[in-house]
Image (spheres, rainbow, N blue to C red):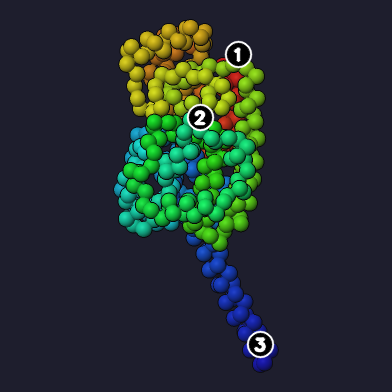
Amino acid sequence: MKKLIFALFLLTIVLLSACQSTDESQNEKSHSVAVSMYPIEFLISEIAKDHVDVETVIPPGTDPHIYEPSSKKMIELSSNDAFFYIGDQMEAFGETLAGTFAEQGLSIYQLADHKELFEQNSDVHADESHDHNDHGEDDTESHEQDHHEEHSGADGIHVHDYNPHFWLDPVRMSLAAEIITQDLIELYPKLEDDFNQNLETLQNDLHELHLEFQALQDEEYTLFVTHKAFDYWTERYGIEQLSVRGVSSSQEPSQNELRKIFDEVEEHNINHIILETISQDRLAMTIAEEMGLRVLYMHNLEALTEENIQQNKDYFDLMRENINTIQKTKQ
């Protein structure tokens, strides 16, 4: 009888321990954030790993300049701890979603508040962003003060005065990783060590990608692209671009602008036009047919495609495919 009682006692302890472990495991997995676009999803996934679930607003293969989430989608996203977005109209829905989520108690993080991330000819250098451990106490305090304020977008810089496609520059992507790491530490301070360790690994990988882009400087490249997303490649790597449209893919050129573009393409003896994988660009296809240009494809990484997801491709895979596309323009 005593053996039976003792066995039941041990079983009770085991069951209670199992329940406690399950609760702790669930608590560890309970962290979740919403993000506007794939580049932010990638950064948080790499920095937080399994600690934080990431839910992206934009569906695969969708242009963020025109996408608007449904009411149902907004309700689903509101259960997250925070919302990360670029801001200043990069995403058509950005400010509206941020305002709604702020009212519901989510922490809001807008990358447009970080002027240094977008300015051209700024002091964003490869060596500085690669060394992420040099954070002074004043910088940390200033960062925390910024994020305890509500970000409606009014106080952020006007990103479209610059270029919002920071993620196409591996060095700026590395700086964005630092910024987001500090945001995540603010949200989940107990995970600081893991976040910083993962950040170091990510920045090393981004530095390697930066070196691969640097190697392109051995040749002179002029790309004919559909919209002016690649300014940072010009600034950092000397890769010139001619563009059908401006910074936004939704801007349509006038007839006079098109005429000037055609003249420049002929002047530079360009034999290609580079389309973006997530857009169905009829104008660009018409230009290609009229001018007899080869059609190449570049990934702007604003959103993954369904095919990218099925093939398990990430930021690094697609950026290296972009390097291959750049090299093909010389063939």
Residue 312 can be seen, yes or no? no
Residue closer to the observer: 56 or 7: 56
Q: Which mark is residue 294?
A: none
Q: Nearer the viewer, residue 42 or 136?
A: 136
| Marking on residue 121 | 2
Find out whether the residues at labels 2 and 3 contact each other: C-beta distance under 8 Å: no
Label 2 sits on a secondary structure element that is loop
Circle nearer the N terminus (2, 3): 3
The percent position of residue 180, horizontal first and vertical second, equals: 51, 47
Q: In the image as oriented, which residue stretches furthest toward the bottom?
A: 1
Looking at numbered disc 1 in the image, what kind of residue is underneath it? Gln
Distance, label 3 to label 1, CA atoms, is 79 Å
- Residue at point 58%, 49% (across, down): 135
Contact (Cβ within 8 Å) of mark 1 with mark 2: no
- Foreground label between 3 and 1: 1
Mark 1 and mark 2: Cα distance apart in space: 31 Å
Distance (Cα) linking label 2 and label 3: 74 Å
Disc 1 designates what residue?
Answer: 331
Q: Relative to residue 24, is residue 89 depicted above or below?
A: above
Question: Which quarter of the rendering shows the C terminus?
Answer: top right
Amino acid under label 2? Asn
- Disc 1 crowd rating (10 Å Cα; few below 14, some 14-19, many 20+) is few
Which residue carries the number 3 mark?
Answer: 6
In the depicted structure, whether residue 220 falls above or below residue 306: above
Secondary structure beneath dot 1 equals loop
Upstream in the sequence, badge 1 or badge 2? Answer: 2
Q: Find residue 115 and report its horizontal and vertical position in percent.
A: 45, 39
Q: Residue at x 40, y 35 (%)?
A: 159
